[in-house]
Image (cartoon, rainbow, N blue to C red):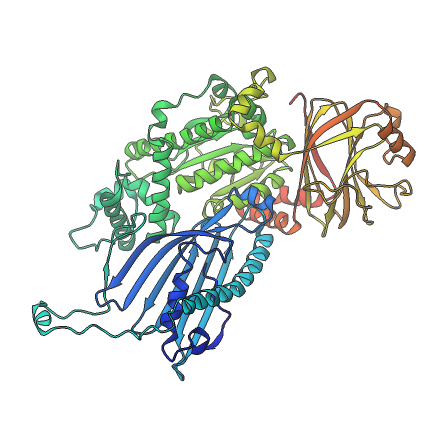
Amino acid sequence: MDAGLPRRLLPWHFWNRAQTLVLQTGCLAYEKRFPTCPQIPVFLGSEVLRESRSADGAVHVVERSCRLRVEAPRLLRKIAGVEHVVFVQRNVLNWRERTLLIEAHNETFANRVVVNENCSYTVHPENEEWTCFEQSASLDIRSFFGFESALEKIAMKQYTANVKRGKEVIEHYLNELISQGTSHIPRWTPAPVREEDARSQAGPRDLGSLEVDGPIGAPGPAPEVVVTDGDKLDADYIECCLGHLTPMQESCLIQLRHWLQETHKGKIPKDEHILRFLRARDFHLDKAREMLRLSLSWRKQHQVDFLLQTWRPPALLEEFYAGGWHYQDIDGRPLYILRLGHMDTKGLMKAVGEEALLKHVLSVNEEGQKRCEGNTKQFGRPISSWTCLVDLEGLNMRHLWRPGVKALLRMIEVVEDNYPETLGRLLIVRAPRVFPVLWTLISPFINENTRQKFLIYSGSNYQGPGGLVDYLDKEVIPDFLGGECVCNVPEGGLVPKSLYLTEEEQEHTDQLRQWRETYQSASVLRGAPHEVAVEILEGESVITWDFDILRGDVVFSLYHSKQVPKPGPQEPGARAAGQLTDKGWVLGVDYSRVEAPLVCREGESIQGSHVTRWPGTYLLQWQMHSPPGNVACSIPGVEDVLTALHSPGPKCKLLYYYEVLASEDFRGSMSSLESCTSGFSQLSATTSSSSGQSHSSPLVSR
């Protein structure tokens, strides 16, 4: 983004001490910021994408790709997966009109966040020795991993700092020009035209028209093709293969196809594939073209066109991946069934790795496109998307294992970017009470158009009128959902630990390091529990936790206090940790238990959540397991702690992760769930009324 001067009037002599048009000198100073600018540390560099000039040299247009370092907390950068963002900046310098217009928009995360900035330098209408500078910017955050509020604050802070810094940078380069002897640039005048040159021209010419010099960096899109009466698609072809298209939509399809034919090296995608990208971008030609360009580059890089011929899923995946194709829905769309609640995502990732799972998901999407083509021919009408039926029976907190959630989010991102408009309908049945927590985590990654295709049912709401029979023929409803059709989709189940990849194999794929970075480690001594304080500002926020017991047995508890515990040793990700409570606290007076103690055995993996009822400080506590008669003892005395620290004895070790879902985000996800289908209202009411309760699920030997 451009970091210009604050909005105000500036006398010309601020830019130039000579009595000439300051815009020329100012623009020369502005251009010195590129391709790099040491005075702006966040500006990592730029590359010219396209450059053009008018025939008379009066208008100069430059389009650049600019890289900016992300000034954000490490956690947010880690979740987003980027260290820098890319903005596209277009500068139009008009020497004749004495104007400089700058437009910038973000390219990174464009489907989640839309940033637009406009700057203009013009001559003051009443005094030609004054420059008018105007700057405006807009920020539209559609979804950003649940960090929308934090991102808005960061963006405003950085934008304000850049505006101030921009003025200092311009002053620096103006002084540099003056020190180099450049203090006067004559005002632009058109070059004289000789009579013989004028006579040689076949007709009048607009001196302001642009002649493209050609791309200096990466090749840009070809000029858009004008659609003529003879350049149309056959009406029967549209009706049978593509579906109804307005003249404008047909025109966009033809232009995008022509652009591919002129610029794309390799196999040209079919019209059905191109049309999906146009629909995903509401037939905005430039946006669809860019999305398609990135997707084609991704397909080439990962050899996706050959995936169905080369990918053979491991036998373990075929046995434990609970998903498969099953006839079609009532509209002729291919039907894919996924029994997610029966699937051991953690076991699968530890047995085959994240990359194998991703490749399998991609093969499902490739097969889906192939089946759509087959159904189009079979039924004689265009079918470009499929239906997915997801059964959540068995879904519990173990599915919130953080590396598994991150892998799911990555898969959603890849599918959204490269298989747009392929999901016609998503039917989610038997959604349990824990589902809203998972939904809050993943919904920001799902495009709004995609979310509108979700229909979610809790309990047995999927049965009877308004349920599955509205979308599936009775003959194809699976037997495990009360239908009569035998379904051959694998049932899933726990993956035996003996089938896990060895640590050496996981290290080879860098998977183990990524998982370890997600968690924090802690040791628990007898009489010296490990505690983490979490500040909650408003009720109905959600605290989620995920921890593995590496050695020993521990008791996990959750407490609430209106007091703020005395700070202990600092550690990343927590306000304070270690032993936080003191001897003087009285249970039921200074603090209260909001969750019953949970005994966790060595080797177990525990995932859970708690919907908070009150604001205040919540304490996650792990203490060494004592005999049954002593489990209720929660707060050790100072003598116990000192004894534990100075005496050799058994020690428990664990890895843990926790996260807070803000009340606003959680309530927003509940609202979006209710908008998916009225059948979810019962689950929504049940979850809302369960504030102060948690959902925990131990997974033995994981």
Q: Residue at x 51, y 45 (%)?
A: 83
Query: Which residue reaches farthest top?
Result: 498
Residue 429 in the image: x percent, y percent? 55, 35
Residue 376 in the image: x percent, y percent? 30, 35
Name which quarter of the figure residue 493 lies in.
top right
Residue 431 in the image: x percent, y percent? 59, 36
Relative to 477, is 375 on the left or the right?
left
Residue 540 in the image: x percent, y percent? 70, 48
Relative to 471, is 492 on the left or the right?
right
Front-lying residue, 45 or 571: 45
Q: How many marks?
A: 0
| Location of the C terminus (image quadrant) | top right
Q: Is residue 242 above or below residue 230?
A: above
Name which quarter of the figure residue 333 lies in.
top left
Q: Residue at x 37, y 46 (%)?
A: 291
Relative to 588, is 616 on the left or the right?
left
Residue 283 visible in the current orientation: no
Residue 659 visible in the current orientation: yes
Front-lying residue, 587 or 380: 587
Front-lying residue, 346 or 210: 210
